[in-house]
Amino acid sequence: MNFSAKKETTSIMKKNILSLILILVLNLSYGQHKFGVFTGINYNYLTEGNFKGLLTESSISFHLGVLYEIRLNDKICFRPKLVFSQQGDRTETKQSSDFNLTQLDYKLSYLNVPLEFKFGNKIYFITGPQIGYLIQTEKMSNDLGDVKSDIDYGFNVGGGFKIDNYFVELSTYKGFSKVYEYEDMYNNKLSLTNTLFRLSVGYNF
């Protein structure tokens, strides 16, 4: 390839890149995308399976996150989020000779990525999968072994409403991955998973 051909190829590539940037800018400026921030409280505990049993003490913690809302049509948006979330059994229990799961006092901190879809406008419904990464474990009383997996995945469902640029959401999350496994006196294995309810308040820019 001679110098002239290389120069022409470079020029075409630059034009294609500029065209792509222009398309992206026009798409973003069309007003179909929103950036938001939110915070709120979690009511969290560990359960066996799909809400079969409450196996640890409940506790209150907080979450903080950002979201990016992509409008697909007049009624549906895709809303990926990035959330720092405090979970686990955060209530310290006094040690005793008779072990029970209330002594599993593990403060768990996750970086979660909910991939939610929003249906509706002023009053809306949200649902979608979530994947999270365990970034910190604090064992307050007994050391009962490590958490089974650093990766947590599950499903979110909830609803919310907005007033101008502000929004309020109430949602629940049910994890599917094992946090802790326990064998009782009858040799039954119990698998504990993350479960929580969230109340969030946020603002869209």
Image: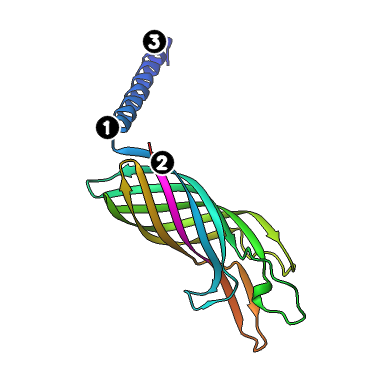
Depicted 80 relative to depicted 154: above or below: above
Residue 55 in picture, x, y percent from top left: 58, 76
Query: Measuring 34% from the left and 20% from the top, which residue is drawn there?
Result: 15
Count neighbours of disc 3 (C-alpha within 10 A) and say few if under 14, some if 14 to 19, many if 20 or more: few
Residue 4 has which mark?
3
Residue 30 has which mark?
1
- Closer mark to the observer between disc 1 and disc 2: 2
Depicted 51 relative to depicted 169: above or below: below
Q: Earlier in the sequence, mark 3 or mark 2?
A: 3
State the separation of the CA atoms marked 1 and 3: 39 Å
Q: Is residue 9 magenta?
A: no
Query: Measuring 23% from the left and 46% from the top, which residue is drawn there?
Result: 73
Query: In which quadrant is the N terminus drawn?
Result: top left
Residue 149 in picture, x, y percent from top left: 61, 62
Location of residue 136 by image quarter: bottom right
- Three-letter amino acid code at the position of disc 3: Ser
Residue 36 has which mark?
2
Question: Which of these two is toward me, 69 or 129?
Answer: 69
How many numbered dots are placed on residues in this image? 3
Please give the range of residues in magenta.
195-202
Query: Measuring 60% from the left and 71% from the top, which residue is drawn there?
Result: 57
Residue at the limit of the structure toward the left, as seen here: 74
- Closer mark to the observer between disc 1 and disc 3: 1
State the separation of the CA atoms marked 3 and 2: 48 Å
Count neighbours of disc 2 (C-alpha within 10 A) and say few if under 14, some if 14 to 19, many if 20 or more: some
